[in-house]
Amino acid sequence: MTAYLIAAAMGVAGGFIAALAGVGGGIIFVPALALVLGLTQVVAEATSLLAIVPVAILGTWQQRRTGDVHVRDAVIIGVGSVVTAVLAALVADAVPQQLLRVLFALFMIVVAWRIWRGAERDAVTDTPTPPAHE
């Protein structure tokens, strides 16, 4: 019963953070499932993929209402993702768990670094230019 409550709390937190920050829930769900619930890396990833379906549907519905969804781009990305997701799932089943966990952690570090660099760049370009003194 406790595991269900923890999973529900992770769903609430993950859904909120994913919608707020515009990130895939997997960034939240996979580490939480592996570290908090003790699932293996491949099971955490597979579980996260299924958990993200309703989040993606409802998040897209809400963002579409405000005109923020580029449907054509989403379809192109989705078609490519379907093909590679099947192949990646086969690879994930064949790769040792520890390697899969290390690869996921490295991916998270790269994503965090890229977000940080983008935030720094945005801060520089968003800085108001002081008025010129005459």
Image: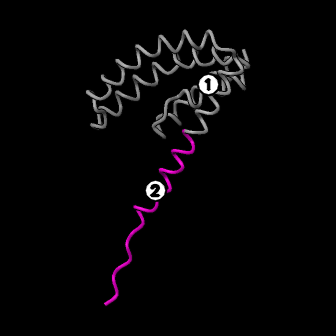
**Residue 133, percent from left and from top:** 34, 87
Q: In the image, what residue type sits under mark 1?
A: Val
**Vertical placement of 121 versus 132: above or below?**
above
Q: How is the structure coloured here?
A: one colour
Q: In the image, what residue type sits under mark 2?
A: Arg
Among all residues in the image, which is located at the extreme bottom? 134
Q: Does the segment drawn in magenta span residue 112?
A: yes
* Residue, disc 2: 121
**Residue 119, percent from left and from top:** 49, 52
Label 1: which secondary element: helix
In the rendered image, the quadrant that contains the C terminus is bottom left
| Residue located 54% across and 39% down the image | 111
Q: Is residue 68 left or right of residue 21?
A: left
**Residue 36, percent from left and from top:** 72, 25
Q: Give whichever of 98, 122 is nearer the camera.
A: 98
Q: Give whichever of 50, 92 is nearer the camera.
A: 92
| Residue located 61% across and 22% down the image | 8
Label 2: which secondary element: helix
Q: Which residues are magenta?
A: 111-134
Q: Does the segment drawn in magenta span residue 26?
A: no
Main secondary-structure element of the magenta-colored stretch: helix
In primary-sequence order, the first of circles 1 and 2 is: 1
- Per the model, the C-alpha gap separating discs 1 and 2 is 29 Å
| Residue located 59% across and 31% down the image | 28
* Residue, disc 1: 30
| Closer to viewer: mark 1 or mark 2 | 2
Q: For mark 2, does the 10 Å Cα neighbourhood hold few (<14), some (14 to 19), or many (20 or more) residues?
A: few
